[in-house]
Image (spheres, grey):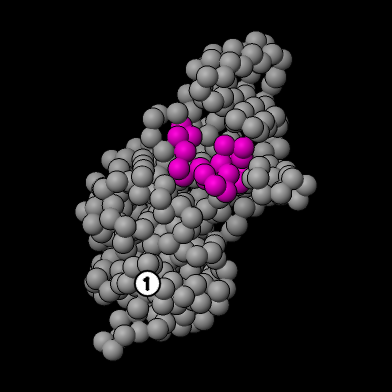
Amino acid sequence: MAGGIGSRFWPLSTTNVPKQFLDILGVGKTLIQLTFERMKKICPVENIYIVTNAQYETVVLQQLPELKAEQVLKEPMRKNTAPCIAYGNAVIKQRNPQANILVTPSDHLILNETAFANVINAGLKIVAENDFLLTIGIKPSRPDTGYGYIQLGKQFDEVNNIIVNKVKTFTEKPELEMAKIFLKSGDFFWNAGIFMWSLKSIDAAFKEHLPEVATLFYDAEKDEKGNIIFAYKTERDVSDTATLNSIYAQSPSVSIDYGVMEKSNNVYVLQSDFGWSDLGTWGALYENTSKDYAENALIGHDIMMYDSKNCVVSMPAGKIAIIEGLDGYIVVDSSDKLLICRREDEQRIRQFVNELKMKKGEAYV
């Protein structure tokens, strides 16, 4: 899944070039390139599909030249994760109705890729043998209010030393005091937004819990053999584009978590700890980046810090920054935009961006 905007990573992440296509970590590779390399170790390149907004087709193919054009599934509009996943399912179903599927965002950080691969391989084995909707839970290290939480239910099994539990409850982004209670209990894991299931299981779940989405994507315009037309024609076919546009125009905007996972009774979770972050905010980047002696995370080569600590600073190549007297701030500069914000107020960045959009239009967001 690579269609998000990443507004909380403004001013680097914008609608035109969102964070998945940026070298946020300063390692010479973008987040989608790092994700693609991770996935290649798990499945063949020809089995990888990127679902993204149509406007990003060119940048996806530029950054991932190993892909063929038909592996980039172009959404005509953003309708959240459930339609995105249904679109991918419809295309995969043309190739292999018996497929087992891994769904992952394109902009996450994974520090221990060996442990990650072990978890994924265990999960794929589980969904091949059971009618499960499987999600990954990350052992929390702090009471973070920016993540969703999964409460563990009864243990089902242990595969390759990885414990599998029935999911008891989902909780979206709790208040700090509740997050502290979750952390102390030991029964709650962060929801990584990474899923595994058989095509058969997720098809059944869509038909039961999101029948309006299932009808649109699985009972769309078909040829004489019953194949979904948009799933195998290229988007250069006008009738195909019209079909897909019509499907998305009619589809509700709904997340897979709310639309399917929270309503299903066959949801299980793998307990995991492989150095994960969704890199959804500058604070998340701060937590997962090396720091100087004063606990400043510096992304850029010409940043000079004086009497400053606990900051995250990002500067573009060729720009020199001298910063004095800050404690716990986010400072991010781009070619035409500057953000200076307290780290503790980073959740307000989305609000700032919305207000900027209202006052200045789309050009700066």
> In this picture, is 330 found above or below 319?
below
Q: Is residue 173 rendered magenta in the image?
A: no
Figure quadrant of the C terminus: top right
Q: Is residue 15 rendered magenta in the image?
A: yes
Does residue 297 appear in the picture of this structure? no
Q: Position of residue 217 (x, y in %)?
A: 43, 77
Which residue is under mark 1?
237
Figure quadrant of the N terminus: bottom left
Judged from this view, the residue extending furthest toward the right is 359
Q: Nearer the viewer, residue 6 or 43?
A: 6
> In this picture, is 275 found above or below 262?
above
**45 relative to 207 in the view: left or right:** left
Q: What is the span of residues highlighted in magenta in the rendered image?
A: 7-25
- Local secondary structure at mark 1: loop
Amino acid identity at mark 1: Asp
Q: State the residue at coordinates (46%, 59%).
A: 54
Q: Position of residue 270 (x, y in %)?
A: 38, 55
Q: State the residue at coordinates (67%, 38%).
A: 346
